[in-house]
Image: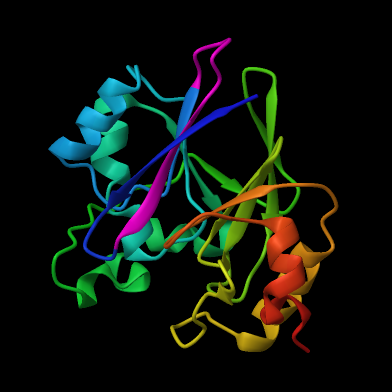
């Protein structure tokens, strides 16, 4: 089973996750808002010397501005949904050019994934579920017992839909699909506190919104 550690990065308090396989030693980072000294110390303290993947739930600036410097230091293939890939290549599309306090170095993704694509850390499967609505390419990552929900699903809430590429109707559809996932999962969102799927099914009105 994968190990999960987290740190808050960037001015918008993004939850950045380190997931690692203790058997193979392979590791990935999800949504690095920045790659500063504190973040690099966090990785070092957790024994990370190189990365296999840099996984992105979507392409907004507060989830991707650490991508380029992180890859330059520790390697790792950059993965993002094909609908949000342009965000990595153009800071205007990611909105980084419109926000003070974030510096994005434009880069290319290594892999543009699609719904149901699958990646591995050791023998641990990480499956992509495309959940558009917050952005066109918003996706969640599902692995054994864990869901990394980005800005699609928060504790008792959902992501905003008023930015370019957002759609409330589409996000409601994505949330209903998440509500159909069976099993017990801890949910690690892009911002705010951890939750779990059973609690959200029972209490999050947006999962049942029409």
Question: Residue 30's x, y, as percent?
Answer: 45, 44
Q: Is residue 16 magenta?
A: yes
Question: Is 85 left or right of 105, judged from the image as shown?
Answer: right
Question: Residue 69's x, y, as percent?
Answer: 23, 39
The magenta span reads 13-26
Query: Would you identify the image quadrant in which residue 18 lies?
Result: top left
Colour mapping used in the image: rainbow
Question: Residue 157's x, y, as percent?
Answer: 57, 76
User: Which residue is drawn at the image coordinates 43% and 83% (left, top)?
Assistant: 163
Q: Classify 184 as above or below 119.
A: below
User: Which residue is drawn at the image coordinates 66% and 65% (left, top)?
Assistant: 131
Q: Quadrant of the C terminus?
A: bottom right
Query: Would you identify the image quadrant in which residue 199 lies?
Result: bottom right
Q: Is residue 119 in sight in this rendering?
A: yes
Q: Is residue 89 in sight in this rendering?
A: no
Q: Classify 183 as above or below 205.
A: above
């Amino acid at each position: 089973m994968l190990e999960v550690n987290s740190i808050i990065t960037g001015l918008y308090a993004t939850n950045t996750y380190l997931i690692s396989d203790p058997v193979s030693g392979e590791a990935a980072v999800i949504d690095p808002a920045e790659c500063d000294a504190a973040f690099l110390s966090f990785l070092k303290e957790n024994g990370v010397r190189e990365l296999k993947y840099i996984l992105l739930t979507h392409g907004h600036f507060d989830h991707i501005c650490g991508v380029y410097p992180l890859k330059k230091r520790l390697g790792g293939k950059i993965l993002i949904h094909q609908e949000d890939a342009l965000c990595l290549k153009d800071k205007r599309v990611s909105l980084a050019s419109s926000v003070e306090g974030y510096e994005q170095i434009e880069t290319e993704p290594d892999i543009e994934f699609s719904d149901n694509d699958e990646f591995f850390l050791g023998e641990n499967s990480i499956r992509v579920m495309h959940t558009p609505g917050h952005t066109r390419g918003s996706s969640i990552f599902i692995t054994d017992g864990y869901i990394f929900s980005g800005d699609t699903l928060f504790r008792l809430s959902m992501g905003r839909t008023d930015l370019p590429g957002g759609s409330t109707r589409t996000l409601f559809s994505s949330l209903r699909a998440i509500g159909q996932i069976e099993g017990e999962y801890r949910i690690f969102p892009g911002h705010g506190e951890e939750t779990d799927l059973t609690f959200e099914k029972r209490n999050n009105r947006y999962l049942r919104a029409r």
